[in-house]
Image (cartoon, rainbow, N blue to C red):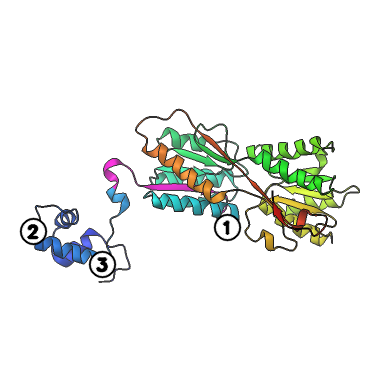
Amino acid sequence: MNNQHQITLKDIAQQLKLSVSTVSRALKGSTDINAETSKQVLALAEELKYSPNPIALSLKDKKTKVIGVMVQEIANNYCSAVIAGIENFACKMGYQTIISQSHEKYETEVQNTRLLASRRIDGLIISISNETRNTDHLQELIDKGIPVVMFDRVSNAIATHKVIVDDYRGAFEATCQLIEQGYENIAHITISKHLLITQNRLRGFTDALRTHQLPVRSEWILHCDFNTEATENKIRHLFCSTKRPDAVLLSVERLSITCLKVLRELELQVPDDVALSSFSDNPLSPFLNPALTSVCQPTFAMGQLAVELLIELIESKQIIKEYKTVQMKTTLHVHESSLRKAVAVGEK
């Protein structure tokens, strides 16, 4: 038999000329099945590498053991690392995952979230898009009995468990490290104003400047979307001004790549002309030229924790009314991009 497809009870029944119900009972170890028949069923099931369909097994309690995951982009290093943690823990707990992407578009997020719900997921883990302001589509899921856990980019409008990092502290420490190196004219390039991570990272940045009695220049705080051309133009204008920054804190990894491209185009050297520090989870950051100073987040652990919290909501026998927001620590990895001189690399 060609067993490229998923082997079913019907396949085993046809080969042995038995009824599907007989095969099913034999696989469950039912004592009302002839011992020889049971032996034949079990032997063929093993030969064909039969495994029960988790969805079919869970129909009785209306659980599919499937978790939906919505991220901005799977190719994003941050997202892929969180997904690895999600899949790792979900598998251990007997759950499967379906991954979907918003591509930083609100409408795509809404459409794909509803598509996931139509596939009878037991719950959803989500980090919202750069455009997302309205979270009604998430409340719709919760109202239908599909629990939601948010991570990274979360919304205060949704009452649920959330997994975040200390964005304020991460930005504060990264900015202080630049100041300690003698950089005083520091810009901040970030994403949409309405996102909580943007607000918290911006507060950490500005508080660090004020702590060191340095000015906060509003014209040096750039809010960008993920339109590469528009972002490049904003950054280009920043560095072509009469008074330009000598250092930049970038709030997301994609912006650091765009910034590096523009600086090279303008023949500005990192860190001699401009120092860079970025929130980043790119494992290649230490190998860039120069190596990029990064505010790193415990992405794998965040994914695992998000699953743990979601399963708690899915499997709880009682209605949960008190929700947790778990804040995890960031780690500042200092490399050449934010150092005045080529000194030893370290961790803070």
Spatial separation of the CA atoms under disc 3 and disc 2? 21 Å
**Residue 128 x %, y %:** 57, 43
Q: Which residue does the image show at 29% across and 68% down from the upper left?
A: 3
Quadrant in which the N terminus appears: bottom left
Q: Are marks 1 and 2 in contact (CB under 8 Å)?
A: no
Spatial separation of the CA atoms under disc 1 and disc 2? 53 Å
Residue under pointer 3: 48
Q: Secondary structure at mark 2?
A: loop
Circle 2: residue type: Asn
In the rendered structure, the answer to whether residue 155 lies left or right of residue 337 reads: left
Q: Give the number of the mark in front: 1 or 2.
A: 2
Q: Which residues are magenta?
A: 58-76
In the rendered structure, the answer to whether residue 57 lies left or right of residue 236 reads: left
Choose between 338 and 243: the one closer to the eye: 338
Residue 335 image-quadrant placement: bottom right
**Residue 115 x %, y %:** 45, 47
